Amino acid sequence: MTPLSKGILLCLFSQLLFGVLYLFSHWMKPLGGTDVFALRILTMAAGIWLMTLYSIGLPALGRFVRERLGTRRDRLLFAIGTANIGSQFWLFMWAPVNGEGVNVATGYFLFPLVMMLAGMLWLKERPNRLQLAALILAAAGVAHEIWTVRSFSWTTLWVCGMYPVYYLGRRKMNVPALQGLTLDLTLILPFAAAYLLWRHESLAVVWQEPRYWLLLPLLGLFSALAMSANLKSGQLLPVSLFGMLSYAEPALLFLAAVFVLHTPVADSAYITYGLIWTGLLLLCLNGWLAFRRPKEAV
């Protein structure tokens, strides 16, 4: 199998696992979304630490902390990013069982478009015609939603507005993906553990129902596998192709929210989604052209 084929399979595998993880809050009822988030942090942290020790070792993680987080400013910026990604992990598990599944999926649809806008404003990147058209369509979809319902979901805004801040901040600090994620989870872990100790009745539910003895290991395993497969595919694939394949995740989240979680969707909202999805299709086309003609400015 060629590295390209392996990268494509790993990327699609990770997207499928992220889609399955979106349903765990539904499967683990009567536990609440925050309960599942805390349990996921515990199990995912264990899996990521095993990956880190196996792939790069503890000394490499120590060097990262000393060299990249040597100043108080760097540590503060990293901690702010950790709080951001922690809120995203929480929202991912809370939203499906609180009627916000579709809105969070929409946030993930908008994320690459907002990343492109941030690149234009912050990194002074110049979009081509397809990228600019995609951005205009997404803006039209958001404007239609605001005009129709006179509001826009805070969960959508939190995902598409704050996730780019995390990614761009980590890029600015030149934080390696695995080391950064390991440290993020390590810092979030005490808060998740404290919450579970405070919500001791949730732990009692877990101990009393045998189905959780299967669901909890699967929650940690799927989380670690999804992250590791995603990180590995990002190393094997061209950036444009990796970005294009990553659009499978929000599509799976949307389908899960509508057909499994039965989240209601207003008829007028499909105009909003249609405009945003059309913009994403243009980005996919742009990524495909960039992949086919890597030496040309697409």
Image (cartoon, rainbow, N blue to C red):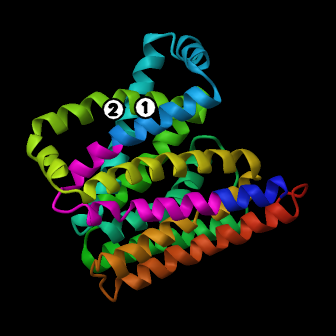
- Main SS category, magenta section: helix
Residue 153, horizontal then vertical, whole percent: 29, 64
Residue 121 versus residue 251 in the image, above or below: above
Residue under numbered circle 2: 188
Do the residues bearing badges 1 and 2 touch, measured as CB atoms within 8 Å?
yes
Q: Residue at x 33, y 38 (%)?
A: 42
Residue 241, horizontal then vertical, whole percent: 73, 60
Q: Pointer 1: residues within 10 angstroms few (<14), some, or many (20+)?
A: many
166 is within the stretch colored magenta: no
Q: Residue at x 31, y 55 (%)?
A: 93
Name the residue at the front extreme. 210
Name the residue at the right extreme. 295
- The reply, left or right, for residue 117 in relation to residue 203 is right
Residue under numbered circle 1: 184
Q: Nearer the viewer, residue 199 or 203?
A: 203
In the rendered view of the protein, which quadrant contains the N terminus?
Answer: bottom right
In the rendered view of the protein, which quadrant contains the C terminus?
Answer: bottom right
Q: Nearer the viewer, residue 296 or 159?
A: 159
Q: Pointer 2: residues within 10 angstroms few (<14), some, or many (20+)?
A: many
Residue 168 versus residue 295 in the image, above or below: above
Name the residue at the left extreme. 201
The quadrant in which residue 56 appears is: top right
Q: Residue at x 73, y 63 (%)?
A: 287
**Total count of labels:** 2
Which element carries disc 2, helix, strand or loop?
A: helix
Whether residue 247 is visible to the viewer of this picture, yes or no, is yes
- Residue type at the position of mark 2: Ile
Q: Residue at x 47, y 59 (%)?
A: 18
Residue 157, horizontal then vertical, whole percent: 36, 57
- Residue type at the position of mark 1: Asp
Query: Which span is picked out in magenta?
Result: 11-40
